Amino acid sequence: MTAQLSKKSEAWSARFSEPVSDLVKRYTASVFFDKRLADVDIQGSLAHAEMLAHQKIISQQDHEAIQRGMAQIRDEIASGKFEWLLDLEDVHLNIEKRLTELAGDAGKRLHTGRSRNDQVATDIRLYIRGAIDDIVGLLREFRLALLDLAEQHADTILPGFTHMQVAQPITFGHHMLAYVEMFSRDAERMLDCRKRVNRLPLGAAALAGTTFPIDRERVAKTLGFDDVCRNSLDAVSDRDFAIEFCAAAALVMTHISRMSEELVIWMSPRVGFIDIADRFCTGSSIMPQKKNPDVPELARGKTGRVNGHLIALLTLMKGQPLAYNKDNQEDKEPLFDAVDTVVDTLRIFADMARGITVKPEAMRAAALQGYATATDLADYLVKKGLPFRDAHEAVAHAVRTCVDRDCDLGDLKLDELRAFSTLIEQDVFDVLTLEGSVAARDHIGGTAPAQVRAAIARHRAALG
Ligand code: ARG
């Protein structure tokens, strides 16, 4: 805690006949966590002051005094010299009080035509907009790393699974591209959410608008907002944009978590499909042989946090009458933690993706077990004229025989295979190989190495 309770307990204003109790002060204060909004708060205030001066609501001298004061406050915050006071409740009042110390009456005039209600809504929107831009950048870095991995292993074959049972052979490049698709949609979702975040609430004042001749469009332009919020009550009260952001963040983490689950399984010595560079792993305090994939495990765990924050914000909103209510102060901690968790996780994953070593022999050995080419054999029979259901049945008999003899379909001799269907000829061995199986799935979205390479090129072009 850097903020401290000041010795003298001041009453809130002349309206109050006794000071607020210390317990209540602590309970209602948000400065410990909302001081993170200081930079956007100052940005918003400067844009507001510029507009007030332009509209001649405050003088040019006052505007300049505010600018000078804010520049100094920025320096004080950056150098850790700013004194945050719990008595002053939140980031907004702390900064305004200091401005008044520095700029006198000009500081007191800054709040003309404004309320903390539209001020805080503006700050959160600016903050989320910045977070979205960071996250979209990190999603790009991460996808570039995954694309490199996909390219290195466009031909590497591993078993694809359904129900955690070997299903069909796929390429590792194709598997990585599945995640690239997910993270591309996550970036799209973030950018879509940004459109609704990027509207200016300032001007709504407490809830009904203001009697001063303000120019909201001017402030929007200064702050880079695409539009102004169209209803003052809605502008100060709804946090749907923060909920949307958390939903998009929860999906990013959910995708990260699915990938983490696979990385953990793949790195298990029993599976041994990959290794993750030592710098991303930790050992055990008791078992010297251990090298644990802590980063993916922790990311899987942290997903719960972000999913929880989404529910927290939805629940925060659901019972609130219009317009602003103090409940909304509770939007910040979940939001900040969601941002921190997603940013930290993406940063580490983008780095870790370049520390993954793929073990093609282990993948290949696994793909050779479990009759991964059974569907290929059925498709082969269909192409020779057998109806699919009959082909399915014939191959099921063949698999049964292989299970009994503990061998793969490709290990059966031609005359043994012909016992299941006389349509089978020498060319069957082309489709029973892993390479034949993946190469045959040669259409958009298929696992063929040629398609994997085309998809990588498409993604790279889109990422610029
Ligand atoms: N700290 C408050 C928040 O986070 C700022 C707005 C307070 N407005 C008020 N009328 N109490 O929402």
Image (cartoon, rainbow, N blue to C red):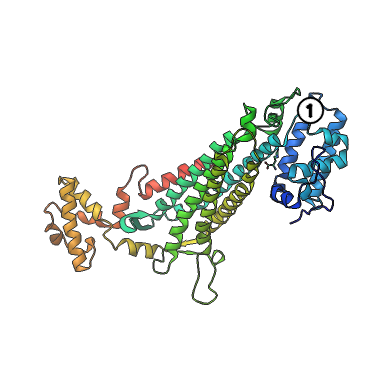
The percent coordinates of residue 290 (x first, y second) are 49, 73
Task: Give the tally of numbered discs.
Answer: 1
Ligand 1 quadrant assignment: top right
Placement of the N terminus among the 4 image quadrants: bottom right
The percent coordinates of residue 321 (x first, y second) are 59, 34
- Three-letter amino acid code of the residue under disc 1: Leu
**Left of 271 or right of it: where is 282?**
right
Q: Residue at x 69, y 50 (%)?
A: 27
Q: Residue at x 46, y 44 (%)?
A: 457
The answer to whether residue 47 is visible is yes
315 above or below 157? above
273 above or below 320? below
The percent coordinates of residue 238 (x first, y second) are 60, 35
Q: Which residue occupies the foreground of this view, 324 or 183? A: 324
Q: Residues within 10 Å of mark 1 (few under 14, many from 20)?
A: many
Q: Which residue occupies the foreground of this view, 74 or 150? A: 74
**Left of 33 or right of it: where is 459?**
left
Beta carbon of the mark 1 residue lies under 8 A of ligand 1: no
Residue corresponding to mark 1: 52
Q: Residue at x 15, y 45 (%)?
A: 385
Q: Which residue occupies the foreground of this view, 412 or 102? A: 102
Residue 54 placement: quadrant: top right
